[in-house]
Image: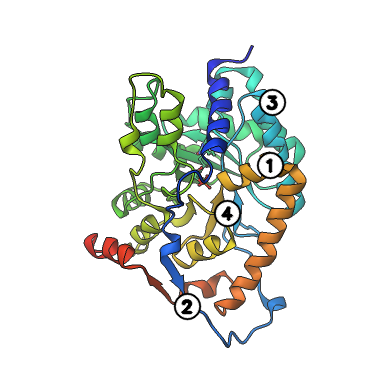
Amino acid sequence: MESAHAHRKDEHLALAEAEYRRHQPVSSLEQVRLIHQSLPDLKISDVSTAIRNENFNFTTPFYIEAMTGGSIRTGRINQQLAEAAKETGLAMAVGSQSVALKDKDAIESFTIARDTNPDGFIMANIGAGHSAQSAQQVVDMIGANALEVHVNVAQEVVMPEGDENFLWLDNIIEIIQTVSVPVLIKEVGFGMDATTIKKLYENGAEYVNIGGRSGTNFAVIENRRYRDKEFNYDFLYDWGQTTAESLLEAQSLQQKPIIFATGGIQNPLDVLKAQVLGAKAVGVAGHFLHTTLQDGTTGLINEITNWQQQLRKLYALVGARSANDLTKVPYVLSPELQNYKDQRQL
Ligand SMILES: Cc1cc2nc3c(=O)[nH]c(=O)nc-3n(C[C@H](O)[C@H](O)[C@H](O)COP(=O)(O)O)c2cc1C
């Protein structure tokens, strides 16, 4: 019999799939238009989409973002994701491992990712409320190359059993200072503003994923888990900053961490736009989960391979030979997004 915590992981999975693209995507990346280049003056064979960083060297700038683990079913999904990651050279993150700190039976649903892809770049994942010791434990559990520490205040608020203690900053500082691998602070889908990103940077965070509202929506998912109860937070469905808005927030800072993006990434053009707006690497969760559930591991491998090939061609459309050139790509914002930028004085 699996624990209630493990059961919650299965519910998240089922509801994320049920809600997939049920609402119009609001990544607001569709509100960013990149300017086409008719004379890119390059050969596609010259294009490299690899990203180089002291700690994050990815051959592909997008990766499989944190989702699963904790139950038998989600362990199987982690295995499928890890198989696809291995085959395509993608980095991946496992879902929150806090369940495996309490329940030893859940450990295997995470270690399966490492067993499947022994040499791959795999990120551990834990909530910001956990101690540095627990953070190190989840890193060691899967021999992780990096650790994602998620901040999910809006999700906790919507969950009746959610945390009510959000004194996270000291924890985050300690985790960054003591854990043996690079740490990426990650929102789960409500975005970040410039002040938050600045605060994280000033407190030692070198890597921040702005995790914008746009795709998988944990206000919807948690609310649906309790839809029969008095708890109802459906008025929070559009809470938070979208992925594009959060990237504009980050752009406004002179000094900042290396920015990652997640939230509503549906195709390689979204990846490119997020990179042009300043993301070093781009996480994809819901879409890759949906592909896996619909088309299996082979389907996911095909989808990732297509994205990899298409992204190289998209670089050519904006005249970029490498990620470094993307910062010079001109773009136009929709009136709505420009209005956000103006009102926020970004
Ligand atoms: C089923 C599911 C479970 C998730 N669990 C976690 C988690 O445990 N930890 C975490 O940091 N993010 C978790 N996420 C959030 C994703 O990593 C990502 O930030 C979010 O889904 C937005 O990306 P998307 O629009 O591409 O899905 C989960 C997402 C899904 C779909």
Q: Mark 2 highlights which residue?
A: 35
Q: What amino acid type is highlighted by mark number 1?
A: Gln
What distance separates the C-alpha of mark 3 from that of mark 2? Answer: 47 Å
- Looking at the rendered structure, the kind of residue marked 4 is Asn
- Looking at the rendered structure, the kind of residue marked 2 is Ile
Category of crowding for the residue at label 2, using alpha-carbon neighbours closer than 10 angstroms: few (below 14), some (14–19), many (at least 20): few
For the residue pair 224 and 303, the one nearer the viewer reads as 224
Q: Which of 296/180 is in front?
A: 296
Residue 330, given in percent of the width and then of the height, sits at: 44, 77
Residue identifier under label 4: 55
Mark 3 and mark 1: Cα distance apart in space: 24 Å
* Disc 4 Cβ-to-ligand 1 distance below 8 Å: no
Rendering coords of residue 7 (x, y %)? 57, 20
Q: Position of residue 109 (x, y in %)?
A: 67, 28
User: Which label sits on residue 199?
Assistant: none
Which circle, 4 or 2, is nearer the viewer? 2
